[in-house]
Image: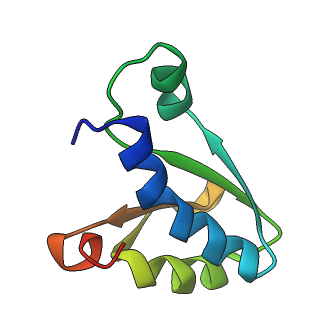
Amino acid sequence: MNQSFESFLSQVKPIITAIQDAGGISYLVGGSVRDYVLKIPLKDFDIEVHNLPIDTLEKILRQFGSVKIVGKKFGVLRIDRSEEHTSEL
């Protein structure tokens, strides 16, 4: 899913807002930041979250798609954003 940064921001902003509304602190990290700097179309994004228990974060993220725990030891969650959920953003 290559997309412009503007499109990317419109999709990630509701997620970051929900995290912040729950008391979390979020940072955009990883390849999406690199790709933005290099002006490469974005494929996905990584958000580092602090100050929220993983179960609370998982509940928040379920609003945006199905959630899969891919690294429980480090609290890594992945959202599968189907058409059903992306149309809501």
Residue at 74%, 83% in the rendered image: 22
Horizontal side, residue 22 vs residue 60: left or right = right
Residue at 48%, 29% in the rendered image: 31
Q: Residue furthest top?
A: 38
Quadrant the N terminus occupies: top left
Q: Position of residue 29 (x, y in %)?
A: 62, 38
Q: Position of residue 23 (x, y in %)?
A: 81, 78
Residue 74 occupies which quadrant of the picture?
bottom right
Residue at 47%, 13% in the rendered image: 38
The vertical placement of 34 against 38, above or below, is: below
Q: Position of residue 76 (x, y in %)?
A: 54, 57
Quadrant the C terminus occupies: bottom left
Horizontal side, residue 55 vs residue 51: left or right = left
Q: How is the image coloured?
A: rainbow
Give the mark count: 0
Residue at 63%, 44% in the rendered image: 28
Q: Residue furthest left?
A: 83
Residue 11 occupies which quadrant of the picture?
bottom left
Residue 50 occupies which quadrant of the picture?
bottom right
Q: Position of residue 48 (x, y in %)?
A: 66, 51
